[in-house]
Amino acid sequence: MAATDVSDALRDLDATLSSVEAVLDLPRLRGQLAELNEQAAVPNLWDDQERAQAVTSRLSHTQSEIARVEGLRRRVDDLAVLFELAEAEDDADTRTEAEVELADLQRAVAELEVRTLLAGEYDAREALVTIRAEAGGVDAADWAEMLVRMYLRWAERHGYPVEVYDTSYAEEAGIKSSTFAVKIPYGYGTLSVEQGTHRLVRISPFDNQGRRQTSFAGVEVLPVVEQADHIEIPEGDIRIDVFRSSGPGGQSVNTTDSAVRITHLPSGIVVSCQNEKSQIQNRAAALRVLQARLLEARRREERAAMDALKGDSAGSWGNQMRSYVLHPYQMVKDLRTEHETGNTAAVLDGEIDDFIEAGIRWRKQLERA
């Protein structure tokens, strides 16, 4: 790499990181960190476990956010010195090391830049994800379960805590639906671009004749509700049923009627939770899911009203958004961003950051248009 190219690359890298630092506002983050440390030090914090978990989660996220930015700044500053050293000593090995570090830093800063694009009203919330089997019979149920694994592996790769609220298993294989929370700040903003219909094309393992099958699964991503959302649910508007939790094939996994199903009578929305052993805990979790669904319904009504006023009919981008082809060739392609890869195994094992980043950038471009 020529000296002028190195100089330009370093200048661009420094400018991008400076822009990111300005948007993230490090003094503000440090102030938030001090407040959270004070809250975490309160002796009776864990008397309210839900609040304690929220405080410690935000504390951990804020600490890592500050450390990430400060670490990148140190690496950018050190990189300039490394290139100067390679040039002064005419050392090919040091120059190669510096060029590798430059490429790594460009990727890392670009990833952080994407985080600054999450500025929507609910983007900072944790995410509530529901995956449902759609058209395609048993293959669709199997595909839905594969998608659940993909997102859980993605979360695991990043060290993100996940809580599974409910899984409804299909009779032959796979699942009818599954709902889980990704408990990190900006979980909703990050995963909301994954919402829509995901299509799988493969040789069906359930077809004795080995024919190719196309199946579909839907991904719904909602922001987790907070107390400030004011989603009030009158007792008379809901019906609560309890039942025994079950596993794959209807196998009982709990000997008590601890699972809870809540039906919201005015809207017909039905949610359930069977992850916890306590009926009270399952009821609380199911209510949180119901509140999130009602909040989303309210948002859609408000958005539809605004679209009607603006004459805006562009709102269906979330449908059929990605295609996963395993036969006759291997490819995963996002139908909105055109981002694609031939490494289908890696994607299904949770390596979806490039797709998420492309989706966030694509959405931001739509908002600016």
Image: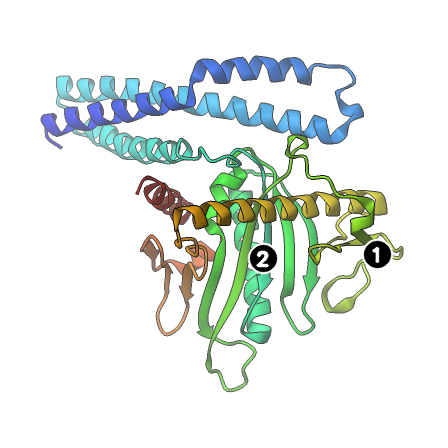
- Residue at (45, 72) in percent of width and height: 202
Q: In the structure shown, which secondary structural element does the residue marked by tag 2 occupy? A: strand
Q: Earlier in the sequence, mark 2 or mark 1?
A: 2
Q: What is the number of the mark on residue 270?
A: none
Could you say whether the residue bearing mark 1 is in a helix, strand or loop?
strand
Depth check, mark 2 against mark 1: the one in front is 1
Between 169 and 241, the residue placed more toward the observer is 241
User: Which residue carries the number 2 mark?
Assistant: 131
Q: Quadrant of the C terminus?
A: top left
Residue shown at the point (74%, 45%) measured from the top left: 287
The residue that disc 1 covers is 241
Q: How far is disc 2 from disc 1 in space, using C-alphas?
A: 22 Å
Q: Who's the residue at 51% across and 25% down the image? A: 64
**What type is the residue that disc 1 sits on?**
Asp
Q: Quadrant of the N terminus?
A: top left
Question: Residue 191: x and y, percent?
Answer: 50, 45
Q: Where is residue 189 drawn, in percent x and y?
A: 49, 39
Q: Is residue 22 visible?
A: yes
Spot the residue most to the right: 256
Q: Is residue 161 above or below residue 45?
A: below
